[in-house]
Image (spheres, helix red, strand yellow):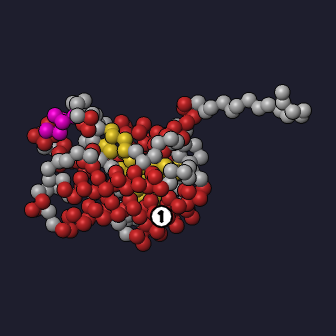
């Protein structure tokens, strides 16, 4: 029997499945966000209700993409210039974004480059350039934004890994090495922030039709060789990343951290 004056309270109803995916009231930052996978993911976040800032080394392109995104979705957008491989640039980006756009709840580490070739044809500069952008860039951005997410008790980091961080492919030493590093960095940071309300996960895309893959798309022989490795028998469409990024950026993934989500048509399931 309850004590006199005590009132029983019914348990709160759980949120609906669709509400879990809502990003209303959240602010996102997408590096390398003005084109390709970056703008695709930015559009998905905006469609789910987030305000979205884009950052890249090309400010004019970012401004153009941000304006188009605002027109298409009605979300608040902003554009910033950054070289993610520069510690000074990333520190300045963090300060500028917080001052001009607001605290970041969702960080999408998408900026990346590729240098292909046999190892004897690759220079030290080729290797360093890929590692600096793809690995150090993720490290610097996480270092700049994760502590403030922890202070606020909520945050989502989504890093862009690759299937080539899981499986090998000839003539991809710099890129494959960098994406394997991103995958393990994601696991470690997921553990470091596991009790804070902040999650750190990665998406590992398979072949998608982006400018980075233009040389493959334009070569029928290479294109066919890629398709033959994909159980679904085709390359990914850009919109097929939308659900993955919204899931990992939202409350729907609140019990997921340190994970690598492969979006690859079954390539790595073989």
What residue does disc 1 label?
144
Q: Quadrant of the C terminus?
A: top left
Residue 125, above or below 32: below
Q: Secondary structure at mark 1?
A: helix
Residue drawn at 30 percent across, 65 percent down: 132
- Left or right of 170: which side holds 149? right
**Residue 78 visible (yes or no):** no
In the foreground, 163 or 52 = 163
- Left or right of 21: which side holds 136? left
Q: Quadrant of the N terminus?
A: top right
| Residue 240 placement (x, y as % from top left) | 36, 36
Quarter holding residue 227: top left
Going by the picture, which residue comes out furthest to the front? 1
Going by the picture, which residue comes out furthest to the right? 4
| Residue 159 placement (x, y as % from top left) | 39, 51
Residue drawn at 28 percent across, 57 percent down: 178
Within 10 Å of disc 1 (Cα), the crowding (few <14, some 14-19, many 20+) is some
Going by the picture, which residue comes out furthest to the bottom? 88
In the foreground, 182 or 40 = 182
Residue drawn at 53 percent across, 46 percent down: 50
Question: Is 23 included in the stretch rendered in magenta?
Answer: no
Question: Is 229 included in the stretch rendered in magenta?
Answer: yes
| Residue bounds of the magenta highlight | 225-230
Count of numbered labels shown in the rendering: 1
| Residue 242 placement (x, y as % from top left) | 41, 39
**Residue 128 visible (yes or no):** yes
Residue drawn at 33 percent across, 60 percent down: 135
| Residue 68 placement (x, y as % from top left) | 44, 48
């Amino acid at each position: 029997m309850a004590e006199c004056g005590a009132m029983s309270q019914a348990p709160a109803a759980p949120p609906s499945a669709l509400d879990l995916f809502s990003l209303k009231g959240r602010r996102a930052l997408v590096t390398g966000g003005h084109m390709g996978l970056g703008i695709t993911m930015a559009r998905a976040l905006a469609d789910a209700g987030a305000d979205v800032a884009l950052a890249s080394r090309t400010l004019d392109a970012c401004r153009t993409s941000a304006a188009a995104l605002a027109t298409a979705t009605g979300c608040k957008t902003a554009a910033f210039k950054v070289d993610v491989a520069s510690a000074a640039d990333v520190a300045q980006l963090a300060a500028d974004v917080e001052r001009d756009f607001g605290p970041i709840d969702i960080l999408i580490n998408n900026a990346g480059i590729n240098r292909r070739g046999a190892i004897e044809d690759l220079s030290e500069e080729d290797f360093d350039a890929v590692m600096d952008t793809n690995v150090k860039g993720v490290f610097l951005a996480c270092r700049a934004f994760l502590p403030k997410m922890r202070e606020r008790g909520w945050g989502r980091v989504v890093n862009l890994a690759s299937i080539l961080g899981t499986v090998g492919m000839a003539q991809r030493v710099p890129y494959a090495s960098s994406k394997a590093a991103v995958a393990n960095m994601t696991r470690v940071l997921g553990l470091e922030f596991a009790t804070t309300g902040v999650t750190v996960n990665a998406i590992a895309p398979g072949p998608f039709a982006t400018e980075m893959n233009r040389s493959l798309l334009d070569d029928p022989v290479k294109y066919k060789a890629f398709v033959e490795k994909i159980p679904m028998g085709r390359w990914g469409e850009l919109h097929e990343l939308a659900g993955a990024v919204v899931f990992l950026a939202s409350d729907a993934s609140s019990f997921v951290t340190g994970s690598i989500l492969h979006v690859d048509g079954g390539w790595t399931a073989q």
